[in-house]
Image (spheres, grey):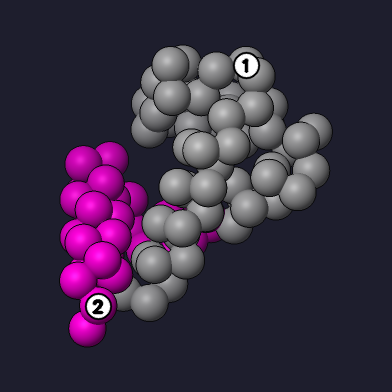
């Protein structure tokens, strides 16, 4: 297996454990992040949900769209599906 893929899977697993997320929930968050990348109007809703659940902070998800964080969430969601 590709070492970078293994590292990404380990980081995803750690993130999920840290916030008590199962693979299905992480996959849903990833899907919502992917949709928010394509439709900025969904960002505020996703942001509100993740901040409310204390999964991410205001710094990680500021009011202005943070594509880096969205891409990371989308990637972790895709990896969670494979776990």
By secondary structure, the bulk of the magenta-drawn segment is best described as: helix
User: Do the residues bearing badges 2 and 1 touch, measured as CB atoms within 8 Å?
Assistant: no
Q: Which mark is residue 3?
A: none
**Depth check, front residue: 51 or 67:** 67
Count of numbered circles on the image: 2
Q: Which residue is mark 1?
A: 63
Residue 24 is situated, as x and y percent measured from the top left of the image, at: 43, 64
Ranked by sequence position, the earlier of labels 2 and 1 is 2
Q: Secondary structure at mark 2?
A: loop
Q: Residue at x 65, y 27 (%)?
A: 65
- Crowd band around label 2 with a 10 angstrom C-alpha radius: few (<14), some (14–19), many (20+): few
Q: Which residue is mark 2?
A: 2
Q: Residue at x 65, y 19 (%)?
A: 64
Can residue 56 be seen here? The reply is: yes
Residue 46 is situated, as x and y percent measured from the top left of the image, at: 61, 35
Magenta region, residue range? 1-30
Quadrant where the N terminus is found in the figure:
bottom left
Q: Is residue 37 above or below residue 43?
A: below
Alpha carbon separation for disc pair 2 and 1: 36 Å
Residue 61 is situated, as x and y percent measured from the top left of the image, at: 51, 24
């Amino acid at each position: 297996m590709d070492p970078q893929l293994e590292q990404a899977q380990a980081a995803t697993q750690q993130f999920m454990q840290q916030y008590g997320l199962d693979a299905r929930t992480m996959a849903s968050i990833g899907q919502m992040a992917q949709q928010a990348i394509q439709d900025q109007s969904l960002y505020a809703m996703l942001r509100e949900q993740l901040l409310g659940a204390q999964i991410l902070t205001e710094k990680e998800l500021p009011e202005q769209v943070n594509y880096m964080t969205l891409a990371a969430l989308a990637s972790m969601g895709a990896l969670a599906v494979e776990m």
